[in-house]
Image (cartoon, rainbow, N blue to C red):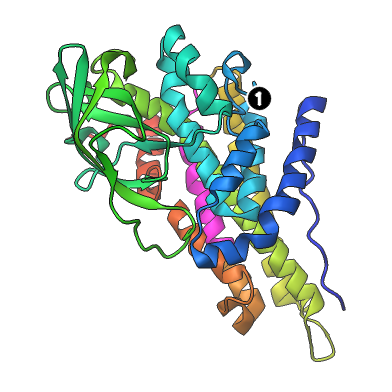
Amino acid sequence: MPDRAPQPVDRQLPTDEARDLFSLVRELVQREIAPSAAEEEDAGRFPRGTFSLLSESGLLGLPYDSDFGGGNQPYEVYLQVLEELAAARLTVGLGVSVHSLACHALANFGTKEQRAEHLPAMLGGGLLGAYCLSEPSSGSDAASLRSKAVREGDDWVITGTKAWITHGGVADFYTVLARTGGEGARGITAFLVPGDAEGLSAAAPEKKMGMKGSPTAQVHFDGVRVSDARRIGDEGQGFAIALSALDSGRLGIAACAIGVAQAALDEAVSYATGREQFGRPIADFQGLRFMLADMATQIEAGRALYLTAARLRDAGRPFSKQAAMAKLMCTDTAMKVTTDAVQVLGGYGYTADFPAERYMREAKVLQIVEGTNQIQRMVIARHLAGPETR
């Protein structure tokens, strides 16, 4: 029996404009991203040209205001675009999500003058961003960060090291959280730092299990000087800005996770319907049929959860709890589904000749980035039962 081509996800899109957008996205995926994804990841090549193409096509600023070069699309649409990109190559899908995260502070907390000056290039002018919150000694406990910004006249001088920075060393701009006051969350301020600022440098990229085409590196700030005009929001408002960005960013990770899971399911179905044993396709055996059914059900449930959170966000309603739930469930689903996909393919699933093993390696990081899944459980529990007692 011949392999079965994956069927496109039947998406419920709110407008004709969104449907046209998806036609563009699928064309770009099939022509520019999917054909070389495995080769490019294996070689560890960063797809800068792909990001430039996405920018030219208006796909790097989808959820932002069209007055500043964005696409004016609701999160319900933007997240499904991320899913499509991540299904083809997670380095691209997650890279777009990180770029959107890096734009969030300026787009939502910057002055009108700041947005007019910087956002058009960030959203549609070919620039690529990175988000600098985590540090070597402060990951989950982000409020304990140590990087400092000291006021000198009309400038700020930033000193410190950020860790686990996606696009570290290749980004054109960095949204940086640094300490300008006392200890704790209230002493943190946000800054927009150019990628070519004097004193800014990146370490060698981390050697990772997956996503080898996406550079993750420490970024060093050795007396980096930026003007006060690049401070975003008020002094001491940085941590609140960071949390606001992370609520939205978690939805991006959730959508990427479902993209990876969907790609793994498509691969498993194609293999199971084409591979024969004992005179018939292995998809005829109940053990595998039930595995595929469970995988598909988990993916649909995860997609529904992230879309529910997105629609709350689009309606201007609180969505922090649902964002944490979506990030938790969708990334756990991706890990389970990709592991099962490897099992469906058997020995072939363990080889690099098939993409299942890459999906499995990539899924793992999604349970860690932008708040580990243990942190997501803490966030959800706080919404249900209040803060922990000491």
266 left or right of 358 in image: right
Q: Residue at x 56, y 24 (%)?
A: 313
Residue 66 point in image, percent of width and height: 63, 17
Q: Depth check: give the residue in front, 25 or 222.
A: 222
Quarter of the picture containing the C terminus is top left
Residue placed under numbered mark 1 in the picture = 73
Q: Main secondary structure of the magenta part?
A: helix
- On the picture, is 299 further left or further right than 185? right
Q: What span is colored magenta in the figure?
A: 318-337
- Describe the element under mark 1 as helix, strand or loop: loop
Amino acid carrying mark 1 in the image? Gln
Magenta span contains residue 321: yes
Determine if the magenta segment contains residue 320.
yes
Q: Which residue: 80% across, 74% down?
A: 273
How many neighbours does mark 1 have within 10 angstroms: few (below 14), some (14-19), or many (20 or more)? some
Name the foreground residue: 351 vs 269. 351
Q: Is residue 97 visible?
A: yes
On the rendered structure, is 148 left or right of 383? left
Residue 294 appears in the picture as rendered: no
Please name the residue shown 35% across and 28% down the image: 242
For the N terminus, give its image quadrant: bottom right
Please state which of residues 356 and 95 is positioned toward the viewer in this rendering. 95
Query: What is the x, y in percent for residue 229?
Result: 32, 13
Tell me residue 280's x, y (percent). 84, 85
The quarter holding residue 190 reads top left
Residue lying at the far top of the rendered structure: 112
